[in-house]
Amino acid sequence: MVYAYFPADPRVRREVESLRGAGHEVDVICLRDDGELSRETVRGVGVVRVPLLARRGGRLRYIFQYVLFFLLSLVQLIRLHRHRAFQAVHVHSLPDFQVFCTLPLKLRSIPVVLDLHEALPEMMVARLRIGFRSLLVRLARLAERLSVRFADQVITVNEAVKGVVAERTGRSDIVVVMNSPDAYALRSGGTVFRCTSSSPVTGIPNTSQRFEASLPRYLSRIPFCFCLGSPKMKSKPTLICRR
């Protein structure tokens, strides 16, 4: 379950491919982009798209869309479970509180996995340009703490996010599953390109030397091009490339 588009979201797509490769049946509940079907099968994966298109906006826009997706996906999850009898539910954040839509299944002892793509309080500070002491950020910290404690297993994207969330929630068994390109697809050639932000929370260094040193081994000989910017976009982005 993800507040994003599928199969466009690469992290969700890679995880689904891994589950399918291990022989599991998978259904995905996600947003519906323009021109997409409400229901279809993508490479053996059942995809159910709720009638909601994510749009950027102010605080009320984000809250409205998050709450609406929560309600729509809850209905779809219950409906699908009646026919599929799920053995586990994997929920992607943002938002963190999306994990609570699995309560009807958790009450039946079905394990719930929470996948933290970002640290919600830090994301809100950067995206909405508000202070850490604001009411919304305090509510985000509460949602993060309750969500992490509610899930049977928590995974996240890097050690930096893991450290921040573990310190705030007291949970020590968070597992890191890093975002990464498909190493097998890159064996035939190609260039890795990504736009992201460099900050203590993303765990991405802001200099070319430190950045290259932080790359995993399987990217050591692959051309890459990363566009790094500050979370608040107050400075010009830095382009780091290697041919």
Image (spheres, rainbow, N blue to C red):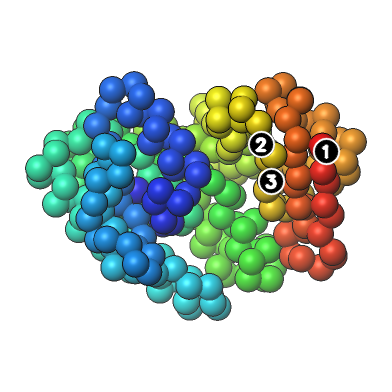
Sequence-first disc among 1 and 2: 2
> Circle 1 — which element?
strand
> Circle 3 — which element?
strand
State the residue at coordinates (64%, 56%).
122
Circle 1 is placed at which residue position? 242
State the residue at coordinates (68%, 71%).
129
Cα separation, mark 1 vs mark 3, equals 11 Å
Amino acid bearing label 1? Arg
Query: Is residue 3 visible to us here?
Result: yes
Circle 2 is placed at which residue position? 190
Cα separation, mark 2 vs mark 3, equals 10 Å
- Check the picture and name the quadrant holding the C terminus: top right
Amino acid bearing label 2? Gly
Circle 3 is placed at which residue position? 193
State the residue at coordinates (44%, 68%).
54
Camera-side residue of 27 and 1: 27
Amino acid bearing label 3? Phe
- Residue 111, picture quadrant: top left
